[in-house]
Image: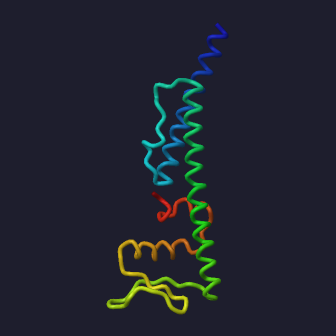
Amino acid sequence: KTEMERLTKLRARQGEEVKDLRAKVRKECKRLHVNESDFVVDESLEGGAQFKALTQQLQRLDGVVAERVDAVLAARGRIRKLKDKLGENLEFRLAFDGELPGSEGGVVVLEKTAENEKFIRDLAEFKDPGNKDVSLFSRCIG
């Protein structure tokens, strides 16, 4: 009887842990704006196999964050090199009507497109980002 009770409690605890891991995977997918179906774990798996699969999906999601951070750090490095080459800080803005895109004197004039408008808004929003912000930065999502 005691062994059966112990096993029943163990299964119940495992079931709760699996439920918590599933919720965590869903939450991370939502936070990172990734497709949850890419990180789904088959519900027919049982016990340790399900726990292991969910843990692996969380590790994959950590990898997504790391890739985004690396991409942004690389972009920052390229921008820093360009800034050093120019000898001054860069300022980004959208072109006025009739103005051609280009750069001069540290001012980068971007063509007026929806993507560039979003870039300018994102740039202002993430002027001094931390790694947590970088993982959410919409320019890295894709």
User: Which of the 4 image quadrants contains residue 121?
Assistant: bottom left
Image height of 43 relative to 107, above or below: above
**Depth check: 50 or 112 in front?**
112
> Which residue lies at the image location 54% right of the left edge and 29% below the top edge?
50
> Which residue lies at the image location 42% right of the left edge and 42% below the top edge?
37
Image height of 47 relative to 123, above or below: above
User: Which of the 4 image quadrants contains residue 36?
Assistant: top left
Which x, y percent locates residue 1? Answer: 64, 7
Which x, y percent locates residue 41? Answer: 48, 34
* Quadrant of the drawing holding the C terminus: bottom left
> Which residue lies at the image location 54% right of the left edge and 71% below the top edge?
126
Which x, y percent locates residue 16? Answer: 56, 30
Image height of 105 relative to 5, above or below: below
**Furthest residue toward left:** 98
Position of residue 16 in the picture relative to residue 33 (left or right): right
**Furthest residue toward front:** 85
> Which residue lies at the image location 51% right of the left edge and 40% below the top edge?
23
**Depth check: 53 or 104 in front?**
104
Image height of 94 relative to 105, above or below: above
Position of residue 60 in the picture relative to residue 30 (left or right): right
Which x, y percent locates residue 30? Answer: 47, 50
**Depth check: 74 or 2 in front?**
74
Picture colour scheme: rainbow
